[in-house]
Image (spheres, rainbow, N blue to C red):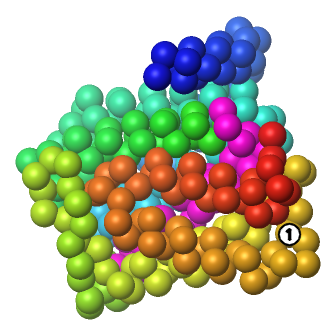
Amino acid sequence: MYAALDAALAFLRDNFPTAREALTGGPIALAWAAGGLQVAGWLKSFRQWRTGYTRKVFHFLIFASAAAVHVLWGTRGVCLFGAMTSAVVFHAVWRGSGYPPYEALAREKDAPHRSYFILAPWFATLAGGLASNLVVPGAAAVGYLVTGLGDALAEPVGTRFGRHEYAVPSLAGVRSTRTLEGSAAVFLASTFAVVVGVLLSPSLALGSHGLWMAPLLGLACALLEAVSPHGWDNAVLQIVPSLLAASLFTGGAS
């Protein structure tokens, strides 16, 4: 345990943005994340979109952006982008009920633990991103895209088309369900995300087996999302696809 903690701390130290990077890239990342959450808040408050939609608008924007930042600027860029996004999310939680960006993230059905189910996915995202970049940095973009696209589609599809519900574990005593329709969306979107993530990652290659291995990876992602505790699927949907992609599409990325 201590060895893993030391490795994580060393990783963060080595990838901590410099003062110059923070001053040049920080304001841009902060404005991008804040703008995305403001749009989600506007859709919630003024367009009357359901939280299942607005929450995932922001979710998709952040994970897709993280994948792009990772490909262009590597882990250091993702760490900076993540720090700025965290500031935006924490500010929304601090403002609380009635603040449009908060309402865009806080599901009504999660009451009385609405803030918990904003912060729990944030910590899950942090843990998943840290683990992926620590173990298989060359495949981390696959995890970002699977989580950003596969998981992002599950809730809106389930909200709109879900008819066949099933219960999932919850760590805060809030009854939580998912739908088979949402899980099917995870499968399709994750398969697509795996292909795109592999193509964007210089250390990965689809190879001759890619077209039939990607759906298997997508199915694994859908099953993982189906059994993950409510609020914590952002961790496993980053770590496992990244590990599998590193193994299947390179024989081991580094």
| Residue 51 quadrant | bottom left
Instruction: Please provide percent x and percent y for residue 122.
Output: 41, 40
Instruction: Please provide percent x and percent y for residue 66.
Output: 65, 45
Left or right: 172 with respect to 53?
A: left
Left or right: 148 with respect to 212?
A: left
Instruction: Look at the picture and state if 131 lies above or below 139.
Output: above
Local crowd at mark 1 within 10 Å, few (<14), some, or many (≥20)?
many
At 19% from the left and 65% from the top, the residue drawn is: 176
Instruction: Look at the picture and state if 128 lies above or below 48.
Output: above
Residue 157 is covered by the magenta coloring: yes
| Residue 118 quadrant | top left
Question: Which residues fall within the magenta stretch?
Answer: 134-158
Q: Amino acid at mark 1?
A: Leu
At 67% from the left and 59% from the top, the residue drawn is: 244
At 25% from the left and 32% from the top, the residue drawn is: 95
Placement of the C terminus among the 4 image quadrants? top right
The residue closer to the viewer here, 45 or 195, is: 195
Residue ID for mark 1: 206
The residue closer to the viewer here, 207 or 82, is: 207
Instruction: Please provide percent x and percent y for residue 178.
Output: 29, 74
